[in-house]
Amino acid sequence: MVISRIFLLILVSLSLQCSLFQGEPGRPPKIDGVPIPDNKRYLYIQNVRNNTYSAGTHTRLTQMIMEEIDRRGRFITTRDKMKAAYRLYSEIVHYQQVGDLMDLADRQLTTELFVVTRIELVEAQSGAKLLMERNEIPGRAYYSTQLGYRESEIEAQNRLLRIMALRIAEEAERSWYFSLAGKTN
């Protein structure tokens, strides 16, 4: 009886500290030990544009970028463009599928996917583009439907797009953070 009450008390105290009840992640980003205010953390993610023949990759990449940015917790994503302090624009500019290894009958055994996505982060108030280390994010994946770990083109695309979403989120966060840190110093 006493043990169950102690367990219940511990469970309640831990759940009250959970970010579910506090609304935001437990560790908001900081500059010189000072948390960045929430109004500078709102990000609007524009749907990724697609200038290639590959149908559907842009919608999956948009969803994966949103998931990755939400998972990382630096930005607070919003679908209201007017509420956002920053806007992230992306565009798939190159998609290439090349057969790397061929058999004697000229059938592809392994295939390489190569994708380039152009990104820009814009401050909503001024419309100024933030400086980025890279404004084009390349991605490459290899797959085979016959050899080794077998996977389809869609599975390889999803693996590639997850990696690209991670790189895009890192690049956007780095650009945003250093633009804020430069203004405060």
Image (cartoon, rainbow, N blue to C red):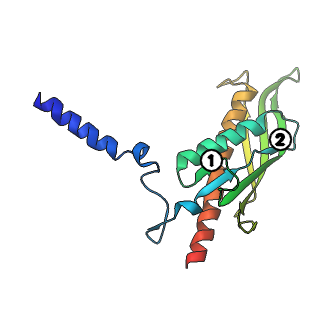
Q: Residue furthest bottom?
A: 185
Could you say which quadrant of the image residue 12 lies in?
top left
| x and y, in percent, of residue 63 in the image | 67, 39
Q: Which mark is residue 132?
A: none
Could you say which quadrant of the image residue 164 lies in?
top right
Say which residue label 2 marks.
Answer: 95
Is 5 placed above or below 168 here?
above
Q: Which mark is residue 166?
A: 1
Between 144 and 183, which is closer to the camera in this rendering?
183
Asked whether, in this view, residue 153 is left or right of residue 64, the answer is: right
Say what amino acid the circle numbered 2 marks. Answer: Tyr
| x and y, in percent, of residue 55 in the image | 83, 33
Between 131 and 76, which is closer to the camera in this rendering?
76
Q: Are marks 2 and 1 in contact (CB under 8 Å)?
A: no
| x and y, in percent, of residue 145 in the image | 73, 22
Could you say which quadrant of the image residue 84 lies in?
bottom right
Is 70 placed above or below 185 here?
above
Quadrant the C terminus occupies: bottom right
